Amino acid sequence: MADTATSTAPAQEKEPFFGKKERRLLTDPLNDNNPITVQILGVCSALAVTTMVYPSVVMAIAVTFVTAFSNLTTSAVRNFIPKEVRMIVQLVIIAVLVTVVELTLKAFNYQIWKQLSVFIGLIITNCIVMGRLEAFAMANKPWRSFLDGIGNGLGYSGILIILGVIREIFGRGTLFAGSPLEIDIIGAGEKFMINTTAPGSWFSWYSNNGLMVLPASALLIIGVIIWIQRSSNKKLVDIS
């Protein structure tokens, strides 16, 4: 009896769990594809909540959580979503996650919830969240979509925290005000590390800049960040 030849199909190469492409999903939004300074998304909340660092950090965590898990959920069910109602389904997913964030914040930190309540709710309409669902999660697998959500959330967070640090230090003379980590850096009074009213103080000429607590200052700072970023990264010059 002749031997029967058997042939086996070549094993499909497995995609790496955390390869180069996956790492780029986390790193690209920090600079080359930053949602605020390159994509010009989510600017409204960046102007409104960054007068102090503490609210900026809370907002950054909230948006990162919503972006990551809305990407993950949408990608997991993308093949079951009718094309005609996909945006409605996406909004429902985002709204559920935003509600979770809002109720958690209200339960554990009521003061910061009162300060951010309107803007937490507006995460539902944040262009970054909706944009990543349409541009990435609807066309990619859950793990990569989850990483994309985290990456864009971190890119957004970085700009928010930079704005918060600059605006709070120069506008109020403090850092992390309203949190257990509050630091009084410079201002008129003994509670500040640098007391501008102390006899013989080298900083008697200094006063905190009231412009920094206005939304216009955030717009100016974002403009400076965009200028610095595009001056140092020439491939971003032609991106509008």
Image: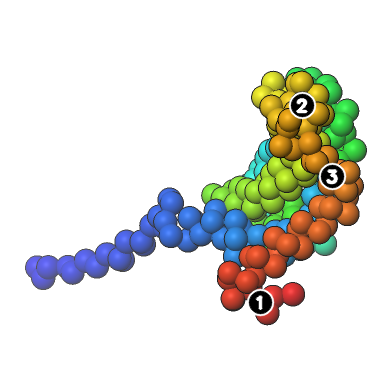
Residue 223 image offset from top left, x and y in percent: 76, 63
Q: Compute the Cα span from label 1 to label 2.
A: 50 Å
Quadrant occupied by the C terminus: bottom right
Residue ID for mark 2: 199
Instruction: From the image, state whether disc 3 or disc 1 is nearer to you.
Output: 3
Residue ID for mark 1: 237
Q: Secondary structure at mark 1?
A: loop
Q: Compute the Cα span from label 3 to label 2.
A: 22 Å
Amino acid bearing label 2: Pro
In contact (CB < 8 Å): disc 3 and disc 2: no
Q: Earlier in the sequence, mark 3 or mark 1?
A: 3
Residue ID for mark 3: 209
Residue 93 image offset from top left, x and y in percent: 76, 44
**Residue found at x 81% / y 59%:** 220
Amino acid bearing label 1: Val
Is residue 5 found left or right of 53 in the rendered image? left
Is residue 137 found left or right of 10 in the rendered image? right
Q: Secondary structure at mark 3?
A: loop
Amino acid bearing label 3: Asn
Q: Compute the Cα span from label 3 to label 1.
A: 32 Å
**Residue found at x 87% / y 31%:** 115
Residue 8 image offset from top left, x and y in percent: 27, 64
Q: Indicate the quadrant where residue 11 lies.
A: bottom left
Q: Is residue 231 above or below residue 214?
A: below
Residue 95 numbered tag: none
Name the residue at the front extreme: 200
